[in-house]
Image: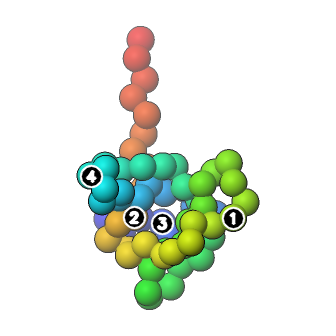
Amino acid sequence: MPADTTPGASVEVWNRSLSAWCGPFQVTQADADGVVVRRMDERQPLPHAFPHAAIRTPRPTPRFR
């Protein structure tokens, strides 16, 4: 299922250097070329767009009892 890439949506991004999903990030812009995100605690978006395949909806945080 594709991630919600509407502006304001919370997403995770695949970090190739870490080989891990990172986030959460907030979508600022999305088009056919890619998705632009920003860190939740920052105002400026990251300097490049990510391909749609590198974006996913965050997984729910497990709750421990």
Q: Residue at x 57, y 66 (%)?
A: 46
Q: Amino acid at mark 4?
A: Ser
Numbered label tally: 4
Farthest residue, direction front: 17
Tag in front: 3 or 2: 2
On the question of residue 56 being in view, the answer is: no
- 37 relative to 10, above or below: below
The coloring applied to the image is rainbow
Q: From the image, which quarter does the N terminus lie in?
A: bottom left
Q: Amino acid at mark 3?
A: Asp
45 sits left or right of 58 in the view: right
Tag in front: 1 or 2: 1
Disc marking residue 44 = 1
Kindly state the secondary structure of the residue where label 4 is placed. Answer: loop
Q: Earlier in the sequence, mark 2 or mark 4?
A: 4
Residue bearing the label numbered 4: 19
* Crowding near the residue tagged with mark 1, few <14, some 14–19, many ≥20 C-alpha atoms within 10 Å: few
Residue bearing the label numbered 3: 4
Q: Residue at x 39, y 64 (%)?
A: 55
Cα distance in 3D space between marks 3 and 1: 20 Å
Residue 17: x, y in percent?
31, 56
Kindly state the secondary structure of the residue where label 1 is placed. Answer: loop
Residue bearing the label numbered 2: 55
Q: Quadrant of residue 15?
A: bottom left
Q: Quadrant of residue 61?
A: top left
Q: Amino acid at mark 1?
A: Gln
7 sits left or right of 55 in the view: right
